[in-house]
Image (tube, rainbow, N blue to C red):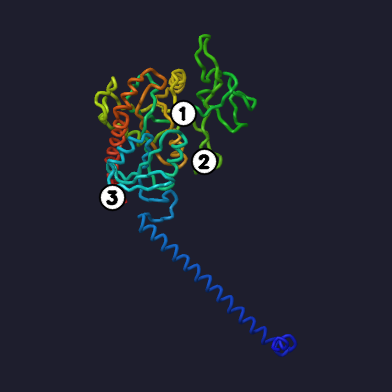
Amino acid sequence: MSRSKMSTSTSHEPHFKMTFSAAWSTTVRSVALWVLLVLALNAAASSQNTAALSSHTGVTDHGTAGCLTDCTPRFGIVSAFGNEADLLVGKTADRREYRINGNAFTTGVLEGNSVVIVFTGQSIENAVMLTQPLVDHFKIHHLLLSGIAGGLSDANHVGDVVIPDKWALPLEGYWNGSSEVPAPCGKAGDLTCVGEKLSTYTSASNSDYQIKTPAGLASTGLFMRDTFAMTAANSPQGEFKFDYAVDPEMLAIARTIEPELDRCGPKNKSLCVSSQPRLIVGGRGVTLSTFLANSSYREYLSQKLAAVSVDMETAAFAHVAYANGIPFLAFRALSDQAGGTDYKEAGAFFGSGLAEANESRVTLAFLRAWSKAHPNHVPHSSH
């Protein structure tokens, strides 16, 4: 009945409009209040969950890029050799371990420096996979890497520790069909149409890697090229680089240290290398995606690039450091002359524990020197 009256009586129409408008306004206000209440409750729940997580893990969500897990300024120490990582972790005070994608990142204080240590294992892929999360999850002000390497210079010996001043990736290559300079874009040496840049070290004919045969040198057509690198400063154009230069200040401090290096490792004193190991600073280190045990290619790298060491991680680590704008340095203990005949020396190096002992001594000596040079940065605690 009221429904009939509303539909037929003109005298009730204004009242209906006013009633409907008032009811609608009330409904809108009620919905808005409910929405605000729900948002407030969700925010409170989120805050409580964050607080509970912080209480449980000790991790505070600062919401800052570059420190998703911990925002204490730290040295990032990357170890490519597990036994050495264990030695460094064992000497770290106030240790705390975080698991990220199944990998252990250990924070603490080492030789007066707040640090975070991670073990990468072998290969370019692992070096990149672990260094970038290190930078993402912790506030890294400098990066260090230490591990083992093959020697490329006849002047160096098994047990020596090298600290190159630059690193390169010589197997970033252009594989041509002959020893003639590649010309895919019509002009010799021009690779722009395929988005590449030929290295200046192999920009002439017969500068490719060539194999010695009884009939003379045989061409492989394998020319070096530069690596494309993109940073916040050069994006989106990026740039091409052959060498990644280490941090000048870190290198200068490395030149001042005098760690005592052993001939015989701690695990087996009867296994010793023939010459007293030395610390050698400077020169070019190179990184390959293959394990080098080929004397011909070793000689090529030594002659063409004056390279002193070869490994499977450092230049990739350096690329990550460069892309993120973080100063870096790397130490490498020489395990053998890559492709050489020093197998007994290599056996003594690994079997006696000399590898990790000498590597860790260089790392610790450097960190002591760094904290001495930067006394205001010495932490009171790791957290």
Residue at (33% x, 44% y) in the render:
115
Q: As shown in the figure, which amino acid type bears the numbered disc 3?
A: Ser
Label annotation for residue 381:
3
Q: How many marks?
A: 3
Q: Earlier in the sequence, mark 1 or mark 2?
A: 2
State which mark lies toward you, 1 or 2. 1
State which mark lies toward you, 3 or 2. 3
Classify 10 Å Cα crowding around label 3: few (below 14), some (14-19), many (20 and above): few
Classify 10 Å Cα crowding around label 2: few (below 14), some (14-19), many (20 and above): few
164 or 137, which lies in front? 137
* Marks 1/2: CA–CA distance: 26 Å
Could you tell me which secondary element the residue under label 1 belongs to? loop
Q: Quadrant of residue 187?
A: top right
Q: Position of residue 129 (x, y in %)?
A: 46, 40
Label annotation for residue 288:
1
- Badge 2 is on which residue? 234
Is the residue under label 2 in contact with that under label 3 (CB below 8 Å)? no
Q: Earlier in the sequence, mark 3 or mark 1?
A: 1
Q: Earlier in the sequence, mark 3 or mark 2?
A: 2
* Marks 3/1: CA–CA distance: 39 Å
62 or 340, which lies in front? 340
Label annotation for residue 320:
none
